[in-house]
Image (cartoon, rainbow, N blue to C red):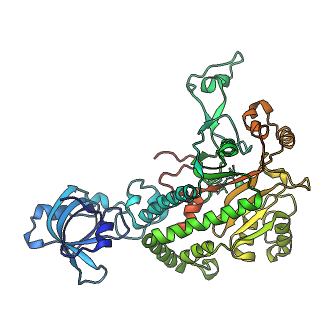
Amino acid sequence: MKRTEIATVLKEEKIGEKILIKGWVKAFRSNRFIQVNDGSTINNIQAVLDFENTDEATISKINTAAAVSISGELIASEGKGQRVELIIEQIEILGEANPEEVSKTVMQPKKHSLEFLREQAHLRFRTNTFGAVFRIRHGVSFAIHKYFNDKGYFYIHTPIITGSDAEGAGEMFRVTNLDAKNPPLKDDGSVDWSEDFFGKETNLTVSGQLEAELAAMALGKVYTFGPTFRAENSNTARHLSEFWMIEPEVAFNDLNDNMDLAEDFLSYICKYILENFADDVAFLNEREIQEQKSKPQNERNELTLIERLNFVIANDFERITYTRAIEILHNSKPYKKKKFKYPVEWGIDLQSEHERFLVEKEFKKPVIITDYPASFKAFYMRQNEDGKTVAAMDILFPGIGEIIGGSQREERLEVLKEKCAAFNIAEEDVWWYLDTRKFGTAPHAGFGLGFERMVMFVTGMTNIRDVIPFPRTPKKAEF
Ligand code: 4AD
Ligand code: MG
């Protein structure tokens, strides 16, 4: 007999059929009811054991986490909690799990902290929460490809090893093929890095944007979707050293087109997940509601997870300029009561306390801030007429902060060259990029969506380490 996945069994409910399932034991109650899950859905199937007619050796091995193969007849269930159940005709233990060892893991049925779960690289995938999160993570990535494909964008693979620092923030991990224990030395005894990567200084990419611009100025509409790396020593719930980023880049788009695209894109992803991962979202929604109960009233979310997703689907974002944001902050209660830790004045980069105020208190919805001062934004952003600001946009989400960063690009060669000079970027290092402004330059724009921050938003998880299977954070790369 061919195996049927539990998701299919529960969806089709073919009462009276003989089926074969395989999965892992979630629980075994009253020597009779085995809850089995195979990862295809958050829901378990209940398999009913004929205890009297099963040999003792087999029964002793039906333990939580064991892998089993079960065949039998699907019947309508009379018990509450499930609509169908499987009457076992044959059960085989494929892989045992020692109950004593299981009791020390997250498989033990009680509430575990997310920190504890994080230490269990393998078994956290088996929990309801992480099963749901990682199925949804897949769904988000699929929705992204589907969105762009349906709209005629081309997926461009940009390099991971590169000589460029696209963001100019100097937060790069160096790539080297030198023998760290025995590196080539210069005459003065210092390491000769010029031999690095066969004679070229390289690092792991911080963004695929510059390469995507080259492609966009030929193919029109492109996007990247790949891992990016940042050597910033930030130990926060929103930063990873290795994260995935989606970067659409579109020829002939200006900043307004860029904002429209971003809103439509974010809304599409939320809709896709609500429609296609309803069971997982419902589970996470309920999980969050329960968690919120243990929090003081003023720290609770105003909206549930599902309400937040619907909010983004409704596409109601606030758009304000940076200058306006500073004004609003100046007139705010926390500013007047000196509650902000960081100063608020035109020219400063907004801190997360300021962003949170705007999103969660002032507007209570996603906010797009545009036209930031040029001084703390990247060299490639288009200079505005005022000479002080650039055509940048950051999208801020409740509970997440910055989820998207983007801009209209500086398409004027002379202005871009001046920017390079001001940012200490040698023209000969970026000649390949400047070329896009020499051969039929045109306005174009794009943005970067932090993939894990998006997964946080659609799952309601509050720590970025809990939405990526193997998080890389400072000093953490063991598994
Ligand atoms: O704002 P960022 O640095 O923008 C860029 O890299 C541009 N090249 C994008 C573009 O215009 N094509 O990063 C974009 C997004 C942020 O808004 C954030 O969501 C996410 O990437 N991000 C991180 N996510 C997790 N961990 C980190 N350390 C992150 N740094 C940025
Ligand atoms: Mg940014």
> Which quadrant of the figure has residue 129?
bottom left
Which residue is at the front of the view, 144 or 99?
Answer: 144
**How many numbered circles are shown?**
0
Q: Position of residue 133 (x, y in %)?
A: 47, 63
Determine if residue 369 is in view: yes
Q: Is residue 359 left or right of residue 452?
A: right
**Residue furthest out toward the right:** 386
Horizontal placement of 287 versus 126: left or right? Answer: right
Depicted 41 relative to depicted 289: above or below: above
Quadrant holding the N terminus:
bottom left
Taking the spot 58% from the left edge, 49% from the top edge, the residue there is 154
Residue at 44% of width from left, 60% of height from top?
117
Q: Foreground residue, 362 or 141?
A: 141
Q: Residue placed at 30% from the left, 57% from the top?
A: 101
Residue shown at 63% from the left, 77% from the top: 299
Q: Quadrant of residue 17?
A: bottom left
Q: Position of residue 421 (x, y in %)?
A: 85, 37
Q: Position of residue 250 (x, y in %)?
A: 69, 52
